[in-house]
Image (cartoon, helix red, strand yellow):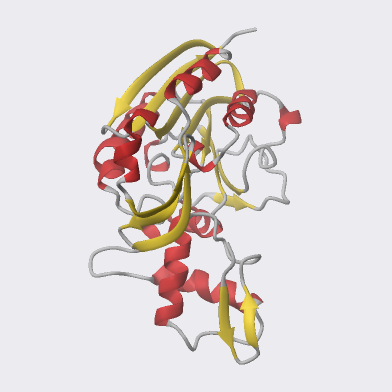
Amino acid sequence: MKTEQKHAEGIVNLSPILPFTSPEMAVLWTKYCEERPKDFPVSRWDYVGKFNNWCSTLETASKRWIDNLHSGKDKYRDDYLHPRIRKKVESIEGGRFILDIGCGTGEAVIPYLKASQHYLGLDVSRVALEYASRKHNILLVDDEEFPDFNKDRILRFGSLPNAVPLERGEIFDEVIVSMVLHHVSDLRTSLETINEMLYPGGNYFIVTFDSDKRDQVDGFFNRICYKDEKRTIGHYKLPQGMIRNVTIHFHDNDKVFEELKKHSDFIHLDECAGIFQIFEGIKKRK
């Protein structure tokens, strides 16, 4: 995404330094530019701090924008999916090591952890992680740092496999991957990488869009610019506003199931809210 903003010295390309890693961030940046047009110092590095501070204090009449960075107070997620994730988290035994891929602000998982559980939350939105760190009092480590996974709870900026080096091997008992797969085109590599994080006998809980409900999901777009059998690209409607050129990859349910089955002793599929598909299973024992 190329993002530019004019100031006294001309146009500054901000994309390398601002965390535009989710559609919601683009909406927030647009709103920031509209509300704070004079808040642009000469040094472009100062933009990051000012933008993050603005996000942290931004409020509407009823809620904080940053609190809904990833969910956007989406009715489907809030009323149907998040209760299912909570039920899953509450069913996990104490003492387990949990990896939450695409944790966002942590609202769906962190409040329901047991005191004895170990937790690592990964995300590519630094703003979301900073908010989660403050709200839940969890250590946030950068992608250059090598975290001590024996600490009770950690948040880390980055994505797989870099955020959890594969040479560490199988170190998690549970992996939660909610609404992440539609961001990636390479399904097989993503699932193989997720599998490599789990101990044999470990559990996974993966949520993605139901490919059989594609027409309904496509209805969330204000305008579709391109569509083929695997993806839809267009202008996407969010509660915060509309953003352009969003890509959603639709991974066929049967292909996801067959790929997971290669690594699983048990796998179960379940539909949620008519548009989500939940894949829950257990990794094969050696």
Quarter of the image for residue 114 reads: top left
Front-lying residue, 172 or 245: 245
- x 43%, y 58%: residue: 24
Is the residue 64 above or below the residue 11 in the image?
above
- For the N terminus, the quadrant is bottom right
Q: Residue 271: x percent and y percent?
A: 31, 25
Residue shown at the point (44%, 39%) measured from the top left: 179
Residue extending farthest bottom: 8
Q: Is residue 92 visible?
A: no
Tell me the quarter of the image containing the C terminus.
top right
User: In the rendering, at what x and y percent does residue 159 appear?
Assistant: 62, 43
Establish if 219 lies above or below 126: above
**Along the line of sight, which residue is nearer the eye, 40 or 117?**
40
Q: Quadrant of residue 201?
A: top right
Instruction: Return the x and y of residue 250 as percentages of the image width and height.
Output: 45, 35
Q: In the depicted view, which residue is nearer to us: 40 or 214? A: 214
Q: Which residue is found at the position 24% from the left and 41% from the top?
A: 79
Q: For residue 205, what is the image quadrant?
A: top left
Horizontal side, residue 214 vs residue 26: left or right:
left
The residue positioned 28% from the left and 69% from the top of the image is 60
Going by the image, does 247 lie left or right of 79? right
**Image location (x, y in percent) of residue 68:** 36, 55
Given the current orientation, which residue lies at the most extreme right position?
A: 167
Seen in the picture, residue 227 relative to 26 is either above or below; the reply is above
